[in-house]
Image (cartoon, coloured by chain):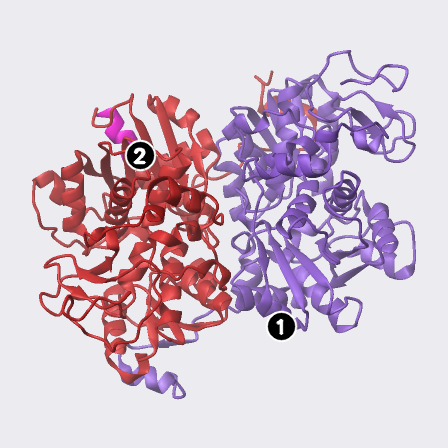
Chain colours: A red, B purple
Amino acid sequence: MALASTESVSTSTSTSYDFGPAVGLSCRECGALYDLGPNFACIECFGPLEVAYPWSTGRELAADQVGEALRARIESGPGSIWRYAPLLPVPADVATKPNLAPGWTKLVKADNLAKELGLRSLHVKDDSGNPTHSFKDRVVAIALEAARTFGFHTLSCSSTGNLAGAVTAAAARAGLDACVFIPAGLEEAKIVMASVYGKRLVAIEGTYDDVNRFCSELIGDPIGEKWGFVNVNLRPYYAEGSKTLAYEIAEQLGWRLPDNVVIPVASGSQLTKIDKGFQELIKLGLVEEKPYRIFGAQAAGCAPVSAAFKAGHDVVRPVRPDTIAKSLAIGNPADGPYVLDIARRTGGAVEDVTDEEIVDAVHLLARTEGIFAETAGGVTVGVLRKLVADGRIDPDAETVVLNTGDGLKTLDAVSAGARPTATIRPSLDAYRAAFPDNS
Amino acid sequence: MALASTESVSTSTSTSYDFGPAVGLSCRECGALYDLGPNFACIECFGPLEVAYPWSTGRELAADQVGEALRARIESGPGSIWRYAPLLPVPADVATKPNLAPGWTKLVKADNLAKELGLRSLHVKDDSGNPTHSFKDRVVAIALEAARTFGFHTLSCSSTGNLAGAVTAAAARAGLDACVFIPAGLEEAKIVMASVYGKRLVAIEGTYDDVNRFCSELIGDPIGEKWGFVNVNLRPYYAEGSKTLAYEIAEQLGWRLPDNVVIPVASGSQLTKIDKGFQELIKLGLVEEKPYRIFGAQAAGCAPVSAAFKAGHDVVRPVRPDTIAKSLAIGNPADGPYVLDIARRTGGAVEDVTDEEIVDAVHLLARTEGIFAETAGGVTVGVLRKLVADGRIDPDAETVVLNTGDGLKTLDAVSAGARPTATIRPSLDAYRAAFPDNS
């Protein structure tokens, strides 16, 4: 399904890769079209590339590629992101290959939290149920298939910890080699997760930015020739994985779009891809077209997009992160301008909450719904609370809030306040003394 | 569906509770039948009570309660243990009530691990995908429904940590109160998990045995009158939750029983209920009858059942646990004799592995399949390896091994060996010096 060379800027050999419905890569800035390959930047304008499909390039679609027929095909698929293989840059038989089969996580009807916040209808999309307990498994799974397709033997990434675990776990399962890069001096829990799968874990003396720059050097060197860096040279494929959050939310609501979605913003990629996913669902006749609002959530200690939104700017001024929400601590978010555009276009907003509000929100979600979120989940729930309180989210609308990770990965954030309600001797008298009001 | 009083020993009022297909409680020792109620011990012989069903009491079953019709009903059910509501002591509408909807976790085809061990066919039933990341969510969910049915307002348990988190999470979601008891001096991670859901966490100055004894005192006191202790007075209901592991394994294999199953043994309840589940599947015509072997796995530092198996004893001599597999550290396992009986009857075995072998097996599973298991998963995989090596598991048979929890909960067990492969400056020369063989 490669594009004819007259239609596209050819950058790779004529090898015809099987990426399912994908027909090429297109520049998000200038629209230039490229053949499918391990490329991530436009050679015309240096804009980011994304995967193009028949439905994004204005082609005619067959009757079995849309609407009821497509819905039936999806519904009979596996309980993982692979049910959406017809909408992703993966071969049709992807579910039969060894991978972690992430996704199809719970959409939890959160009546207790809704009541506490004064909302009529609220759901939590809980991605802590993924194999390595964060949404990263979705994006890594797509990148892994791309790596296989391109004949790469080593999976790699720059990471502040969570992505390193997702990549090494996926590589272990797939039987690929892996070599992942982290800044030296990370927390022990993250080093354990990134090293337990038996792959190469390399600590770099420097900051996360130094790690990133070094990875770009490796891609240009013969060392990295057969390496797939999931968040660099495989980024166009990787990023598509976030669309599955949109598909699942809609399908789990009964093939319907919600009125509001609250999404965490790190690089901003996830938010832009959820919007892309909703647009595709409408275009393919899987859901009815309706307005929806997209809200971005950041930590106050790393809120460059929120700051730009509030100031009415189109560009995002980088910041130096200082927040407990480390998985969102990207001070120079690549997709920041796209996030601003989507929030404004849909009538949403970008807001931020302090570390104290994040911890409060983690506890709020835990005690109302029994969901123990990582700090990123505290950011979205905290921002939701703020948006409801100041009237920017309609209490009568249907809202979905994302939890993208697991509290077990950010124990430190809540451990300070964690202690037994009481410590007593094993006697009824001691219990009565400690809890005089027990009914 | 309460039994007529002539058939059963009546111990409770005539209130007719809705426990779905359950018809009573029966004594596992003397067979005495009781009405459904919050009781756990036979007043005739002090034997443990378990839930009785029409199919266990020899009653005639309607055509839509067995075989193809029942299978279709299950397959159209939700992606959680509630798809098996027709086989559990829960009301038919249980899935519509607020609970954590555990289960329907992945049965992972483990070709890499199979190859490494020399097995033809191996699957890992991976219960780390449950809401609080251990199989405990299954048993607690059934106990929660029983607590609601009996009108209890408080959910409780004695716990060494993991169960406390599962109970408080479930209570939070259900809107019940909870008060859970742990021995003082537990690891911080377990205290965080047990306290984050905002319920009462009471530390007892003493051992786990002291905690247990104190819970029994509370049940007899007015304080505990409306309390459901999931693993004490609700134990008959709670224990039934483990049957769902058997149902899921069979359904996920395509409605077929495996040849071998390797199951961890703490109290032994899980193993006995998996056997009960397989027997029910045969009795109800959901799978074809065939022989299967059940293998129990213990840590050498707490192996009373394995020791009895090897010595040919019918009784289990209690031990003082000393192992890193803390979730299996029950020195006086209530269901030990039943485990011995099942292992012998099915042609299986009970075996144990050292702490070192447990850690090795955690790493083996992680590097071959990308599954990070808690130490209990290291116990089952380690025992599997041992049984294959000495010829007690047939390499050509179809084997399923259980992982009942998540590595993030027992980080300490593997953190000693967890460090970066190398720490380098961000330069290609530094990389080449560290990895001279990189291809």
Q: Are the residues tagged 1 and 2 within 8 Å (C-beta)? A: no
Q: Which mark is residue A37?
A: none
Crowding at mark 1 (Cα within 10 Å: few <14, some 14-19, many 20+): few
Q: Residue at x 46, y 37 (%)?
A: A371
Q: Amino acid at mark 1?
A: Lys
| Quadrant holding the N terminus of chain A | bottom left
> Residue A278: x percent and y percent?
28, 42
Q: Is residue A17 visible?
A: yes
> Residue A315: x percent and y percent?
9, 50
Q: Which mark is residue B115?
A: 1
The residue marked by circle 2 belongs to what chain? A
Q: Residue at x 25, y 74 (%)?
A: A214
Residue A383 magenta: yes
Q: Amino acid at mark 2?
A: Leu
Judged left or right of residue B378, residue A27 is: left
> Residue A257: x percent and y percent?
31, 34
**Range shown magenta:** A381-390
The residue marked by circle 1 belongs to what chain? B
For mark 2, what is the residue? Answer: A257
Is residue A363 shown above or below A162?
above
Q: Are marks 1 and 2 on the same chain?
A: no
| Secondary structure type for disc 1 | helix
User: Which mark is in front, 1 or 2?
Assistant: 2
Crowding at mark 2 (Cα within 10 Å: few <14, some 14-19, many 20+): many
Judged left or right of residue B393, residue A237 is: left
Depth check, front residue: B286 or B174: B286
